[in-house]
Image (cartoon, rainbow, N blue to C red):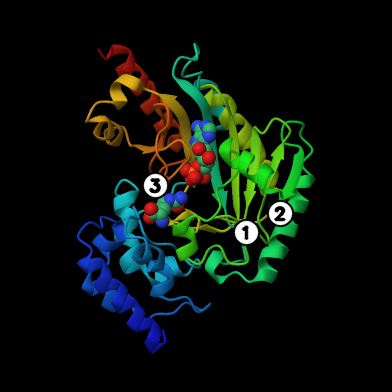
Amino acid sequence: AAPADVVKKVEAGFEKLQKADKCSSLLKKHLTKEVLDACKDKKTKLGATLQDVIQSGVANLDSGVGVYAPDAEAYTLFAPLFNPLIQEYHNGFAPDAKQPAKDLGEDKVAELVNLDPEGAFINSTRIRCGRSLQGYPFNPCLTLHNYIEMEGKVKMILTELKDEELAGTYYPLKGMTKDVQNALIKDHFLFKEGDRFLKEANACRFWPNGRGIYHNKAKTFLVWVNEEDHLRIISMQNGGDVGAVLARLIKGVKAIEEKAPFARDERLGYLTFCPTNLGTTVRASVHIKLPKISAKPDFKEVCDGLKLQIRGIHGEHSDSAGGVYDISNKARLGLTEYEAVKQMYDGIKKLIELEKAAA
Ligand code: ADP
Ligand code: CIR
């Protein structure tokens, strides 16, 4: 069972959330007294406790979600907390629901014609998915040795990619100059450093060891190694050709999957560190200018209705700049990979129609 001092910490965390009037995280909402009592004494085989699950959201009261899974077992052991939270985030995915079989949409990419052929609204399009290597837990439970071993395995797989569009170079974060790192971040290619939500989840230990980025010359196919997830596989390019971006992602995912076994759960699909990414793990986004409708007070409501999520210009927890927003599908669980992309596609098509019609 969880040690007494950990149970104390968890109880103090619960009290802190209860007192925080302005906190509107899913953690605060779903960590009821009953859920606390059902989970506070539990410990996974790897030694993770409820404290590991909630510590980021307790430290960061402005979290939208506030929880992470330290290992795969956490999703079932702490189901009284995760299940209702997952249900609310992913469009009502119920405790007895099951992630459908994988369908990346290879046979349907041609239907995704350019959303903005004139280039009037969309700066760029990006689709990413996450993968966890079978046999390794998530960040808080990884050792320095794990990080270095995982980086070695992934680097080997990536540097052996033969396809011209996928072939590239792996750049470890360790030893990268700050200038290069900051330029990659600014240009939206690399993950940021010092994310307080990840830090408080114990996800940045041994940084920058074992972390890095792989990309092709054009920086249209990229893989993040050991940031929030073991792998983040990314396809991106300027403009609104969603089909081309998806086709490249599919090619990359298939080539990598041939070489590495990934963790997938019967019910939850592909397993990830953050419950918002479970299932398909797909976030398909555009950087888009919608000056008229985004200035209206109901913009967020309109996006909610289209099952879209709004982020700022430098990703999650950042602000818009120059009227450009990052808009993506919100749910990743309970639908297929293709449907996740299509949710973004259909929603953005609608937003562009609304923008054109707006006074
Ligand atoms: P993730 O998408 O992996 O969940 P973030 O929201 O932090 O994580 O975004 C990561 C980076 O990807 C950020 O620099 C963000 O600006 C960039 N990005 C996201 N969508 C697009 C897009 N459509 N075009 C260009 N860059 C994008
Ligand atoms: C939050 O709750 O706001 C952060 N923990 C992020 C939640 C979802 N985003 C993510 O996993 N990238």
Kind of residue indicated by mark 3: Gly
Quadrant of residue 20 in the image? bottom left
Mark 2 lies on residue = 154
Q: Which mark is residue 133?
A: 1
Labelled pair 2, 1 in contact (Cβ < 8 Å): yes
Is mark 1 in CB contact (under 8 Å) with mark 3? no
What is the CA distance from the residue labelled 2 to the residue labelled 1? 9 Å
Q: Position of residue 238 (x, y in %)?
A: 57, 24
Q: Of discs 1 and 3, which sits in the foreground?
A: 1
Label 2 vs label 1, nearer the camera: 2
Residue 126 seen in render: no
Identify the secondary structure beneath mark 3: loop
Q: Residue extending furthest front?
A: 179
First-in-chain label (3 vs 2):
2
Which of these two is toward me, 62 or 166? 62
16 horizontally vs 281: left or right: left
Give the CA separation, mark 3 to mark 2: 28 Å
Q: Earlier in the sequence, mark 1 or mark 3?
A: 1
Kindly indicate the quadrant of the structure image that contains residue 352. top left
Residue under pointer 3: 334
Choose mark 3 or mark 2, whichever is in front: 2
| Residue at x 71% of width, y 54% of height | 154
Q: Is residue 224 left or right of residue 357?
A: right
